[in-house]
Structures are given as C-alpha cells and as structure tokens.
Amino acid sequence: MKRLWFIAILAAGVTACVEGNNPVQLVNAFPLTDSCDLADKARLRGMLNFNAGTSYNIAFTLYSPLEVAPGDNASPAGFTAQEIILSYEARNPKVTLNEESEPIYFVVPPGADTESYIALNLIGTEARKKLDTVVPIAPDFMTLLATVKLKGRLASGKEVETNEATYPIDITRANSCGPGTVPVTTSDAPCAFPGQDANFSDFTCAPATGG
C-alpha cells in the first residue's frame, strides 16, 4: 500500500456507494495491523469486546476521480479534508446516538487510487459514553451501524463532501479483567487496541496504573 494515509482520532461488508460527483470516495474497509498498516484483505463487519476495548479502528481506501490536465493551471488541485462526521444506528437494543464531528486536516491529491487510505476510530467520545450503559453481556450482542463521511473544500474554495460509508460492528461484553487490573493488548492487536476482531479475547491483564 502507498504511504498516503491518515489517522483520525475520533473518540465499515461496507455499504459505501461510489458516486461520480464526489471528489473523494470512501471505498472498501480494511483491518489494521499492530503497527496501524493495512492488512491484505477487506473486512465485511467488525466485532468488539467492550470489556477489553471501547474503540474500533478501521481503514477506508480512498479514490479520487479528480484529474489535472498537463499545463492547465485551472484544474483541481485536490481535496482538502476539514471535518469527519460520524453518525450511528444502534440495534438490539435500539438507542439514539448523536452525530459527532471532529476537525481534521489532510489533502487528497487528484487521481488518488485505492492504495491510498484513511484510518480512524469509528466510535466517537459521546457514542462511547452512551454505549457503556447499554452494551449487553455475552452471548448477547448489539449491532452498531457507524456511518462516516468527510467534509472539505476544493482548491476553488467550493465546499464538498465524500460519499457516506456505513460499517456494522457487533458489540458485547465478554471475558474481562478483575478489579484493580486493566486489559493490555497483545502484539497483534490493531494499533495496539485490544478487544477488536481477531483480538476479541486475546489480551492479558495488568495492574491498573495508580490502582
């Protein structure tokens, strides 16, 4: 994968439609490795043990249909992203989660292909607080449909946004650490966050700092 990638700290198969009038499009969702690089295969849905971790990190590949004609200074100079918007639908139980936004800055050049990507946490700060009160205990689970889009500007100053991508995450409270201890990630956990996908139960417990 090319090293055009971005981490957005905001504390999705993907149903993103590729729309021709979007200057940048969020395409497939790929899991992340322990070093936050892209894994080889796209992931269709996520799984999270809320007792081990309350973040869900994933990467979306990016595509830009913008083109720059040689010698044409009026051609688009790319898309400058300025804001991430997250919205949610929760099922079993059905709860209301407010839309969240976070200011960001990065530029996607014209003609970016799907070897470019943005990595982000799909569970925002306020969503995390609300989920903490409603996530069921295993074997029961709830499904969170997290929808993400980016807002920004073209070089002309025109305000534009990407398509929306919706990614489902099954969330439950499974095995956990005892009093006075906290989960510690294994070396394989994506971006060092435990409790996610293949690392759902693969973590150790350590004394809580200051506890």
Image: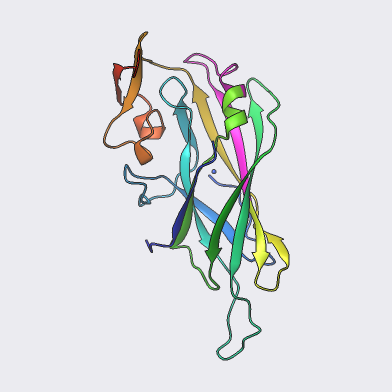
* Residue furthest out toward the top: 179
Residue 99 drawn above or below residue 59: above
Q: Which residues are magenta?
A: 130-149
User: Residue 19 in magenta?
Assistant: no
Q: Where's residue 184, x and y in %? A: 31, 25
Whole-percent x, y for residue 26 in the image: 57, 56
* Quadrant of the rendered image containing residue 99: top right
Q: How many marks?
A: 0
Q: Quadrant where the N terminus lies?
A: bottom left
Q: Position of residue 138 (x, y in %)?
A: 47, 15
Report the residue that reaches farthest toward the right. 158
Task: Write the residue at 61% across / 46% down.
Answer: 148
Magenta span includes 138: yes
In the drawing, does residue 166 fall left or right of residue 175? right
* Residue 6 seen in render: yes
In the depicted structure, whether residue 172 falls above or below residue 79:
above
Name the residue located 32 percent from the left edge and 46 percent from the top edge: 35
Location of the C terminus by quadrant is top left
What color scheme is it? Answer: rainbow
- The answer to whether any part of residue 19 appears in the image is no
Question: Looking at the image, which residue sits at the far left?
Answer: 187
Please state the horizontal and vertical placement of residue 40, each as a whole percent of the image: 35, 52
Residue at 57 percent of width and 67 percent of height: 64
Residue found 50% across the figure and 42% down from its top: 9
**Which residue occupies the extreme bottom position in the image?**
71
- Closer to the camera in the image, 164 or 160: 160
Q: Is residue 71 left or right of residue 194?
A: right
